Image (cartoon, rainbow, N blue to C red):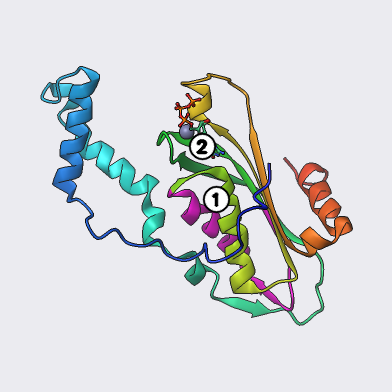
Amino acid sequence: MTADDIPPRPLSGACPVVSDRPSRAEAEAAVRTLIRWAGDDPAREGLVGTPDRVVRAYEEFFSGYEQDPVDILHRTFEETDGYDEVVLLRDIRLESHCEHHMVPIIGVAHVAYLPDRRVVGISKLARVVEVYARRLQIQEKLTAQIANTINEVLQPKGVAVVIEAAHQCMTTRGVRKAGVTMVTSRMLGVFRDDSETRREFMALIHNRCGSGS
Ligand SMILES: Nc1nc2c(ncn2[C@@H]2O[C@H](COP(=O)(O)OP(=O)(O)OP(=O)(O)O)[C@@H](O)[C@H]2O)c(=O)[nH]1
Ligand SMILES: [Zn+2]
């Protein structure tokens, strides 16, 4: 599946802050409600600390709303030795949450770009993945947001993002199909326009030679 039908702008940036964000106490009360709804007693010993733990876990899972990926990519370096080949970060571990069921999406992202003089510290590509992953997502949007942000900020000759992930809403509930992987891609610039560059990217993703893994 591709995200070709998703417009390239304006998806990046910090998320709009909700004006009526509940307090921590209200969030913990909501967890107690869910525990009661599940049929258990939030006052019993083993569950007393659970609302606090769940809210802390959510703080981690959804910390991406507080961060702006554009800032992460802001610091770039001029590449003066004429490197004009693809830069690829392969197998970036991805942990997100599906916006329909709020259960994990686990997989990997492959992120490549073809620089146009300016390059970025490679960890920053993984950080952009991390920020968007730590929001409620569908995989298509996540894929497009990562690619569009890199494209907007670095203005390279092209960007390619592929995500391969398993959705626990399909494995632990619902249709319950274990082992299914969803694959999404977003190709911009030369990766979209030039089939040879796209083929090279796909070969780099799938050719494990020399990776040491
Ligand atoms: N396109 C897309 N669909 C997703 C993603 N994550 C979850 N879904 C799907 O979102 C759909 C939500 O469908 P609904 O019919 O509203 O929800 P549901 O009744 O829980 O559906 P089932 O999962 O089929 O039981 C399901 O088909 C999920 O598999 C995603 O990242 N992209
Ligand atoms: Zn889901």
Residue 25: x percent and y percent? 14, 45
Residue position for label 1? 142
Magenta stretch, residue numbers: 111-135
Which is nearer the eye, 209 or 162? 162
Judge the density around disc 1: few (<14), some (14-19), many (≥20) Cα neighbours within 10 Å. Answer: many
Residue name at image x 43 percent, y 49 percent:
135
Q: Is residue 130 visible?
A: yes
Question: Is 28 on the left-hand or right-hand side of 121?
Answer: left
Q: Which mark is drawn over residue 11? A: none
Which is nearer the eye, 126 or 35? 35
- Is the CB atom of the residue marked by disc 1 within 8 angstroms of ligand 1's nearest atom? yes
Q: Is residue 126 visible?
A: no
Residue 204: x percent and y percent? 80, 50
In this figure, what is the number of numbered marks?
2
> Residue 91 sits in which quadrant?
top right
Q: Quadrant of the N terminus?
A: top right
Residue name at image x 55 percent, y 76 percent:
75
Label 2: state its secondary structure.
strand
Residue 110: x percent and y percent? 67, 50
> Residue 33 sits in which quadrant?
top left
Residue 175: x percent and y percent? 53, 19
- Is the CB atom of the residue marked by disc 2 within 8 angstroms of ligand 1's nearest atom? yes
- Alpha carbons under labels 1 and 2: distance apart: 11 Å
Question: Residue 93 magenta-drawn?
Answer: no
Q: Which mark is drawn over residue 105? A: 2
Q: Which dot, 1 or 2, sits closer to the camera?
A: 1
Q: Residue furthest right?
A: 196
* Amino acid on which the number 1 mark rests in the picture: Leu
Query: Looking at the image, do the residues carrying marks 1 and 2 touch, with CB atoms under 8 Å apart?
Result: no
